[in-house]
Structure formats: C-alpha cells, structure tokens
Image (cartoon, rainbow, N blue to C red):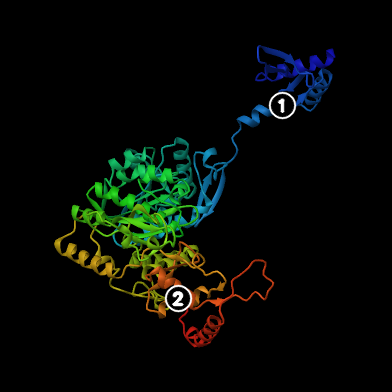
Amino acid sequence: MQETNSLVHCALRKNSELVIAISFVVTFKIYTGKSRLNLKISSKMGAHYHCIICSATITRRTDMLGHVRRHVNKGETKSRYIAASAAKPPNEILKEADTDVQVCPNYSIPQKTDSYFNPKMKLNRQLIFCTLAALAKERKPLECLDAFGATGIMGLQWAKHLGNAVKVTINDLNENSVTLIQENCHLNKLKVVVDSKEKEESDDILEEGEENLGNIKVTKMDANVLMHLRSFDFIHLDPFGTSVNYLDSAFRNIRNLGIVSVTSTDISSLYAKAQHVARRHYGCNIVRTEYYKELAARIVVAAVARAAARCNKGIEVLFAVALEHFVLVVVRVLRGPTSADETAKKIQYLIHCQWCEERIFQKDGNMVEENPYRQLPCNCHGSMPGKTAIELGPLWSSSLFNTGFLKRMLFESLHHGLDDIQTLIKTLIFESECTPQSQFSVPMPSNLKQEECGVFIKTTDDTTPDNYIAQGKRKGNETVTTLAKRQKTDVSTEHPPFYYNIHRHSIKGMNMPKLKKFLCYLSQAGFRVSRTHFDPMGVRTDAPLMQFKSILLKYSTPTYTGGQSEGHVQPASEDTVADRVEMSMNDKAEASSCRRW
C-alpha cells in the first residue's frame, strides 16, 4: 500500500499541472421531509471515488488504488478527462457549388453553434445566386450585402462565380462567425478586407495562391446599423426566424431598382400553426387553409411592402417561393411616393369561406358594406347557419411572379450549371403565365441558342438590360411613363390568386380524373390553368370554385365496390351511371387531343 502511494506521489511530481490524482468524494443524498431536512449517507452507494485521470467512478478504496497503479504503469499521469473537455474538435470542410466552407461541430443545430449552416437550404442559396446573376447583367459592379453571414457560404459563392461584377460584404454580429468567414475566404483563395483603411496594405501583401477576384469585405456589426450606414444594390436577409425587425433598415438606403431578398424560417407562425405569433410579428389574422403556403408568401410580401412604403419606396415582386423549410420573397425597389402609394393599394384583406374554402379579396373602398358575404361567389351563408366566412390579412393581393425576370434566372441557372433549381424555376414560369408547358419560352442572348427539356430559349426585347437605369440615377419622365405602361400591361396578364387542391374537393364515391387530364379539361372549358409549386396536387386557375367542382364532377367516374366494401356507400342512380359511362366514352377523343402538361 505504501509503495502504491509513493508511485502516485512520484507521478504528481512529474506532472506539475496535476494537483490531485485521487479525489475522495463522499456522496450524500438530501432528503426533504415535511418538518425537517435530513442528511443521510446513501446505503446503496456509500463512499465512492473518482479517478481524475479517466473520470471513472469506483466504490472500493483498494480498487481505486489498483486502478491508479495501472495508470501509472502505463505512463498515464495527465488528466485525459480535462484535456478532452478543453480540446476543441476540428472543423469540418464541406463543398457546395465549387465553394469550400469550413463549418463548426454541430453546424446544423442553431442552439449548439455560433455559425449555423443548413444543407437543406441549398435550394434557397441557388435561387438567390441566380437572382444576383440576373441583376448583374443590368449593371455592374453591384454592392451586395449578406447581412447574416454565419459561415459566409452565400457571399463566397457570389464572389467566386460572379467575380468583379459584384462587391460583396459579409456581415455577422458574432465574433466567432466573423473569424470563420475570414478563414473560409482564405480557404477559397479570396482576398479579405476587414477595414477600408487596411485595403491598401492588403493589396500589397497577397498570400501565395490567392486569386484577385475582388475584395470581400467582412464586417462585425449589427445588421440594422450597417444597412443604415451604407447603401447597397442587393441585400439578402436571412436571420434565424422572422425578418420583420430588419425590413425598415433594409429599405432605408437601398438604391433605386435594387433588389431585396427576404428569407423567413418562422414557418410555424406563417403556416398558421402559431396564429398568435403571426399576429404579433406580422399584424395579420390567419387560419389554416388549403392554400396556406401561398397565404404565408403573401403575408411576408405585405410586410415587405409596408416597410418599403414607410421609406417612400414601392416594390415589384419578382418571385415568392414557399417550401417546406422557408419562405423566400424577392422584390425590386422602386423609389418615389407614387410607387409607394401604388404598392400600399395592393395590400388588402381576404374573405375566406370556412365551409367550401372559397375566397376573394375585398373590394377597394372605405365604405362599410351591409352584407360583405355578397362578395363571395358561393352561397354558403344563405344555406348554412351562423357566420360562415372570416376575414384574413392584410395580404398582398397582386402578382407574386415576374415572368421576364424568371426567364432570365433560368438562363443563368443553365449558364452556371445549377441543375437542382431548373425544374423549380420552370414551374414558377408556368405558374406566372398560367399557361401550358407547350407555350413556354425563355429569353436568351442572341449569340446563344439552346433547347433543353423541351424548353425553347429565344431572345425577347422585354427583358433586355436597356430597360433599366444605371446605378444610382433616378428615372426620367420617359422611363417612368414606360414603366407605368409596362405595369398596366402586366396587370391584365397577372396570374389568378391562390389555388385549389384537387384532393380537397374530390367527390366521395367517385374516382376523379388524373391531374394532367383535369388541367386539360379546365383549359378546354375556357379557363386559365396551371400547376403550382406551393402544392403538388394544387391547380391554379381563374375558374370559380363552383365551376371547378362541376368540371371535376363531370369527368369523375363512380366507384364500384362489388358489395365487399366495409362501409355503406350510397349507390348512384342507373341514369346517372349510364350518363357518366356515355360521357366518358365521348370524352376519350377530347382527352387524346389534350396538350402535354
């Protein structure tokens, strides 16, 4: 026993950092009674010991001494437990779109890391990149801001693929994130400018292997303060949660005809799962509907429009996307009180029928109507007891897509090889035009002619960069007139608001037609129709719900159960069945001539 103790003391003398090798800890359990507090030694565990080298828990003293002796014989005299806890795990390097990015451990869990990186937001980053690439064709160089850099992946992709066409500023308030952004810039061989005063010195001292693709300015500042101090051509807001706290600052100094993109990840409130949070953040009343994703997009656009109007600016929505993890809204800024007034008029309330899911925006005007139910096309209020409709909003009531800009984005995705978002952009173009796929064309420069996936790419004059003004200059009278005429023309071709889910309105006991055939039937009936990215089974059409259901009923066939069904299904009359069989035979020729959707 004395030899073991002497070995331990020798180990202590060899390692000056280790003060105690064995920690004798007597565990006491505290029991609270009704009248007094008693301290008792646990009868099961009793006294036990902790090894400070490996943090093992041992009950007997003799076992503890033998345990320490084995550590000494192996030459283990330092505390592995303390060293492991103090050591920082190495950072992992990921690659996305030919851009290397260094991420911290637990990078996909916001609560456990300072620099959050979500691989599921790759689609969002590619959409933003195509937006900036399309804007860079209008004017260059562009002052771009990634207000919440985190790892800096988005700003690095801008600088690496667009080069001198953009001047990127990556900002983050967290010091660890700023350090990680600088390391990622050097990892991608890009030059970092921390302060404008250091720019001249950094130009002379360029590390070996770094490319002169332009400066990436990294700032450590509150996003609101930075957007108040500097003006930008392109601003991207992607905070953790809602972005309403940063909208006023974003529109404060944004340049004329610049672009603001807003990513909102507070989908629990936007998708009507936390309605009180939506009322607190966005000041709107919402419920869960069949078109809840488009409702969320219109809520965010309305908040953006109100923030722009407060700064005497208007907006033109380029596109709005609502997917599983985020809602992305991209708008172009139009300076002037006239544009602000026109934008404010497009924020309206929606009347939603809770029985049949019919909906319509309230009519313009300040006069109170005696019976607002008359605005709805349905007659549920007259046939159903009680109040059948509710008022939702305020919402954005105008178009959510700009067809010309989306076509330019598609060209940029083809040019940069972003295959993941090409299908989504094509769907957005179909949705914006509300036309079949066969009538779809994409603008492209005259020196490039391509055909891909059945999409014909041709040059049009509507989306040429000549229609836009140079950076920092105000619009002239001729430009204002041209822009007003173009907006009036676009109003007549706007896509219908909202969509219907074909499964939601299916008839019980009837087999509904295939979605592609049903779209063809609606088109043959004289209605505009297209699919929507908001819902894979959604149909965007200008047909009223009554017409929608009647056409769905017309081309549905009865379900024959053969007497083996578990529940009772009311059989259709013989005349009805005969009529439907005859109708299905007559419509085979029509279905064969339908266009491909």
Q: CA distance from mark 1 to mark 2?
A: 73 Å
Q: Quadrant of the N terminus?
A: top right
**Type of amino acid at the residue the image marks with label 1:** Ser
Would residue 189 appear left or right of 483 to someone viewing this image? right
Q: Which residue is mark 1?
A: 55
Q: Locate residue 463, reporting x and y percent.
A: 30, 68
Residue at point 51%, 69% (across, down): 506
Residue sitting at the far left: 477
Q: Judge the density around disc 1: few (<14), some (14-19), many (≥20) Cα neighbours within 10 Å.
A: some
Would residue 313 appear left or right of 207 to someone viewing this image? left
Q: Judge the density around disc 2: few (<14), some (14-19), many (≥20) Cα neighbours within 10 Å.
A: some
Q: Locate residue 330, reporting x and y percent.
A: 36, 56
Q: Nearer the viewer, residue 278 or 78?
A: 278
Q: Is residue 501 above or below residue 60?
A: below
**Type of amino acid at the residue the image marks with label 2:** Ile
Q: SS of the residue at dot 1?
A: loop
Work out whether mark 1 precedes mark 2 in sequence or the reverse, and give the earlier one: 1
Q: Which residue is mark 2?
A: 551
* Front label number (1 vs 2): 2
The answer to whether residue 217 of the structure is visible from this angle is: no
